[in-house]
Amino acid sequence: MKIRYDPEADAAYLAVGPRVADGEAVAQIPEIYPPGGRGEIILDFDTEGHVIGMEILSASALLRPEALAEAERI
């Protein structure tokens, strides 16, 4: 998995496998709220129904600091 992080937006994207190309995610499950009401997770799926990635909003509250430190900055 690869993590990309935008510190200004405090949003991270975890790609499952190779980098997700624009338009590759054809379906989403939005509004997954983790315990504690901090942030939101959105799952992305490809045309065959495979999970290809997830966007994490309020990433600094939901991901461990070491994961964000290793993430590619965007």
Image (tube, helix red, strand yellow):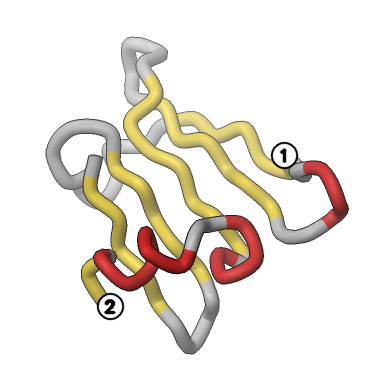
Image point 50% across, 68% down: which residue? 11
Q: Label 2, on which residue?
A: 74
Q: Work out how far the residue at label 1 is from the one at label 2, CA to CA, in angstroms.
A: 23 Å
Q: Amino acid at mark 2?
A: Ile
The residue positioned 22% from the left and 69% from the top of the image is 72
Pinpoint residue 15: horizontal percent, then vertical percent: 29, 42
Q: Residues within 10 Å of mark 1 (few under 14, many from 20)?
A: few
Question: Which secondary structure lies at badge 1?
Answer: strand
* Image quarter in which the C terminus is found: bottom left
- Report the quarter where the N terminus lies: top left
- Tag 1: residue type? Ile
Query: Which residue does the image show at 41% across and 13% down from the upper left?
Result: 49
Give the residue furthest to the top: 48
Q: Is residue 26 left or right of residue 64?
A: left
- Which residue occupies the extreme front position in the image? 66
Q: Return the residue nearer the eye: 50 or 37.
A: 37
Whether residue 35 is situated above or below residue 28 in the rendered picture? below
- Residue 22 coordinates in the image, percent (x, y): 25, 51
Q: Nearer the viewer, residue 43 or 5?
A: 5
**In the figure, residue 60 lies in which quadrant?**
bottom right
Which residue is disc 1 drawn over? 32
Identified at 71% across, 59% down, the residue is 39
Residue occupying the far right of the picture: 36
Q: Residue 69: give x, y in percent of width and height.
A: 32, 72
